[in-house]
Amino acid sequence: MAHWLVTWESTRAEESGLIAAVFDSRKSAASVASAMEIIYASRYFTPIEWHSWARTKKRPYPAAFDSLGGVPWQGRITCGHNPHLFARLVDKLSFPGDGGFPTWHERPRPGTDDLG
């Protein structure tokens, strides 16, 4: 079964790969992007930034879709700075019963040679 997997990514290794959220794969990319903005804001926004967002609807760190040859592709989404959120559709997401680190299979970007 496929899922949207959202992780924190950073230049600092200890902050990368931490799961921020998991969504059903039937959720639209636009819905996932909106949720990512709220997740990011809830962790990093100051009260002034929250007020500005509520008042003007302008987001300091809007979620952005990846692109393939300059064309937006909704298979991967980023939001934020460093650290930032990274969402993508993954297959075979599994959480071990002993509380260990989950595993999943990354889907390759269309047009890449990585087929497995």
Image (cartoon, rainbow, N blue to C red):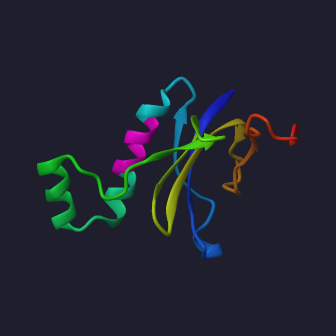
**Residue 30 vertical placement versus 97 (above, below):** above
Magenta stretch in the rendered image: 32-38
**Residue 103 vertical placement versus 89 (above, below):** below
Q: Could you tell me how many numbered marks the image carries?
A: 0
Which residue is drawn at the image coordinates 66% and 40% (left, top)?
69
Q: Give the image location of residue 34, x and y in percent.
A: 37, 40
| Farthest-out residue, top | 26
Which residue is drawn at the image coordinates 61% and 66% (left, top)?
16
Q: Name the side, left or right, on which 37 lies relative to 95.
A: left
Q: Quadrant of the image for the N terminus? A: top right
Which residue is drawn at the image coordinates 60% and 76% (left, top)?
12
Which residue is drawn at the image coordinates 37% and 57% (left, top)?
61
Q: Name the side, left or right, on which 34 lies relative to 94.
A: left
Q: Name the side, left or right, on which 9 lies relative to 110.
A: left
For residue 35: magenta?
yes
Q: Quadrant of the image for the C terminus? A: top right
**Residue 25 vertical placement versus 44 (above, below):** above
Q: Give the image location of residue 41, x and y in percent.
A: 32, 57
| Farthest-out residue, front | 70
Q: Give the image location of residue 30, x and y in percent.
A: 43, 33
